[in-house]
Image (tube, rainbow, N blue to C red):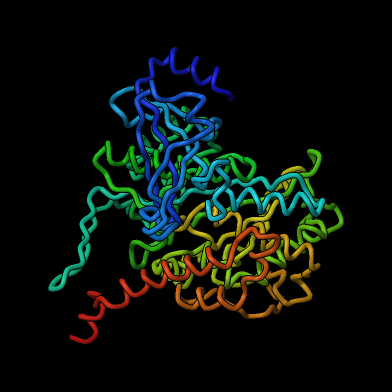
Amino acid sequence: MDIEEIEEIIKRREVKYIDLKALDLRGNLHHVTLPVEYFSQNILEEGVGFDGSSYGYLPVESSDLVLKPVLETGFMDPFHREPTLSFLCTIHLADKGRSRYPMDPRFILEKSVEVMRKTGVGDDIFWGPEYEFYLFKNAEFYSEDFSSGFHITSERVGYYNGYHREIPRDEFLDFRSEAVGLLRSAGIEVKYHHHEVGQAGQQEIETVFTPSLKTADNAVKIKYLLKGLASRRGIFLTFMPKPLYNQAGTGWHLHQMILRDGGNVFYSSQGYANLSKEALHYVGGLLYHAKSLAAFTNASTNSYKRLNGGFEAPASISFGRGNRGSAVRIPGYVKDPSRTRIEFRTPDFTGNPYLILASIIMAGMDGIIRGLDPVEMGYGPAEEGRTILKESMPSSLEQALRELEDDKDYLLREGVFSEELIRKWISLKKEEIKFVEMRPSPAEFVLYF
């Protein structure tokens, strides 16, 4: 899209405001709103200045950064009363040339894709994410000096497993259908939606395969649109990996395949589960680096309650056809060679989607470049009757951060990630750990009071 096309949309839709959105380092969404009269070619070239320290990127002493809209991400925002056209943005330095800011998560994802292209392995990675989340009728939570706790009111499907439950037990069917309508109006194609395993209101919406940047951009929009719709409908939506004890955890399962000249690099009729040599090496990279990857793909203290909590949790660092307990699953129901893919099941949606995808690409590419064979390394195939290396995902965010400190060179290849960004990420996450660990939990009162 160019400025002329945008101006035509502005005129046709009688747009009054332009909204610019960007993620902070943790993955929280921020925005600034401009009267439409101020949106011009100059904005596209010069951008809009903002305080980078409030986004967690720069110190307050030198914090000027610039937002520039990415035109192809534009969508009519359904939550503004006045007609508003929203854009996701790239982050730039405030220099004369508006250079790319090296720690902009979207820029990091762009660089990771370029590493893959330089190797000649493929043109892009295509992703098919599964968006799992819980819906609650009411949610209260607090953590004060003299009191802490949460109380949630949820639907009850009346059965131990809510997977694909039908109405009347599927109380949030209409919400999901309305949500899909919003996603489609924002240019996001949906494969299907359904009730998930968690009987206390767990949902899933799965989107179609898209290239890397579009996948991450869509992820930002999807979280915004789903949470906004839930707020409008007076219900509560969370992507927390484990909001409830003794209920299924919530992940961000990422189906993926590399395409080159329109062909699927991951397919070989002679390979295990129709996987090519490149696909196996890619899997080898994911599994070899799985523990340090978790610092980005499982970015909350709550993440590890899911990874170690049963309910088909992908806690095993292994791969196998149809194995939902493995970190990497090869979908066994795929018959079309062009759709041969892997599913990386460990990630959840508490981190920054650009950094999640970029770190996965860098791990997979390290596997291809170094020829890491997951079978030789003992990671699988994990199938009945076959002995594999018994290695598990980290049991805590603190352990994942230690793994990242010891295993980060693959992320630094060709300057995709930087030492500074990794240090800053570790520092931010250690603050979160301290915030959680310093506070007594209700469970501790049950055990020890």
Which quarter of the figure is the C terminus placed in? bottom left
Residue found at x 80% / y 54%? 119
Residue found at x 83% / y 53%? 268
Please, is residue 68 above or below residue 442 in the view?
above
Please, is residue 413 above or below residue 233 in the view?
below
In the figure, is residue 404 to the left or right of 286? left
Residue 39 at x, y = what percent? 43, 25
Which quarter of the figure is the N terminus placed in? top right
Residue 176 at x, y = what percent? 40, 38
Residue found at x 64% / y 63%? 328
Answer whether residue 206 is visible to the viewer in this image: no
Residue found at x 55% / y 63%? 346
Residue 24 at x, y = what percent? 43, 52
Of the pair 187 and 434, the residue shown nearer to us: 434
Answer whether residue 47 is visible to the viewer in this image: yes
Of the pair 27 and 157, the residue shown nearer to us: 27
- When asked about the image quadrant of residue 160, the answer is bottom left
Of the pair 271 and 62, the residue shown nearer to us: 62
Q: Outermost residue, right direction?
A: 270
Please, is residue 205 above or below residue 270 in the view?
above
Q: Outermost residue, bottom direction?
A: 448
Residue 54 at x, y = what percent? 36, 53
Q: Outermost residue, left direction?
A: 146
